[in-house]
Image: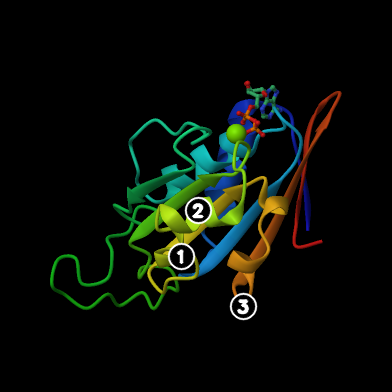
Amino acid sequence: MEYFTHSEKDLITLGKKLAANFKAGDVVLLSGNLGAGKTTFTKGVAQYFGIKKNITSPTFSLMNVYPVKSAGGRALKGQFNRVNQLGTNNLEIRTLVHIDTYRLENEEKLLEIGAEDYLGSTDTVCLIEWPEKLKKLLKNKKIVKINIEHLDAGRKVIIND
Ligand SMILES: Nc1ncnc2c1ncn2[C@@H]1O[C@H](COP(=O)(O)OP(=O)(O)O)[C@@H](O)[C@H]1O
Ligand SMILES: [Mg+2]
């Protein structure tokens, strides 16, 4: 699937829209050059999950962990001790993890900070900028591939090419 966005705002809106399809345990690989819009896209995903914190690339911290507040404006399953009747697929997602490997020396460094506890975890969605650096950690994970390309007129976003 291919999309075209003309502004930063559009790209955030697209992130918000595509986040509705993410399932618990998904590992979303965000590829694209520096400044393509990987972090901007992540801001939209965070909005979908009701996260109010300002999202920035964890370039130095490597990994940011955010508690999910809601999904597309709907309360999480069980959060208010009642059964959710909607039968939707992503109300089990409790944690959003944002990883940026730009300054990562090797995969082991991510293990040291506990990334394995989150990657593929059944109540978590992980987004990874510069996923090309990872191999072992991505094995046997449910992968969603998103590529963002910087064009003169905006950004082309390709999902699961
Ligand atoms: N159409 C567009 N979509 C997204 N970002 C855009 C667009 N046009 C300009 N920008 C700018 O490009 C930059 C994208 O940065 P960022 O999301 O941090 O990229 P990355 O995380 O891929 O390095 C932002 O400064 C944003 O304002
Ligand atoms: Mg970034």
**Mark 2 or mark 3: which comes first in sequence?**
2
Q: Which residue is mark 2?
A: 110
Residue 11 vs residue 115: left or right? right
Q: Which residue is mark 3?
A: 140
Question: Residue at point 65% right, 55% down?
Answer: 29
Task: Tell me if I can see residue 93 in this picture.
Answer: yes
Mark 1 and mark 3: span between their CA atoms? 12 Å
Residue 132 vs residue 23: left or right? right
Q: Contact, CB < 8 Å: mark 1 with mark 2?
A: yes
**Mark 1 or mark 2: which comes first in sequence?**
2
- Residue type, label 3: Asn
Quadrant hosting residue 21: bottom right
Q: Which residue is mark 1?
A: 116
Q: Position of residue 71 (x, y in %)?
A: 38, 57
Q: Nearer the viewer, residue 103 or 79?
A: 103
Report the quarter where the C terminus lies: bottom right
Question: For mark 2, does the 10 Å Cα neighbourhood hold few (<14), some (14 to 19), or many (20 or more) residues?
Answer: some
Question: For mark 1, does the 10 Å Cα neighbourhood hold few (<14), some (14 to 19), or many (20 or more) residues?
Answer: few
Task: Tell me if I can see residue 71 in this picture.
Answer: no
Residue 110 vs residue 124: left or right? right
Question: Residue at point 45% right, 70% down?
Answer: 24
Question: Residue at point 14% right, 66% down?
Answer: 80
Q: Position of residue 15 (x, y in %)?
A: 58, 45
SS assignment at label 1: helix
Mark 2 and mark 3: span between their CA atoms? 17 Å
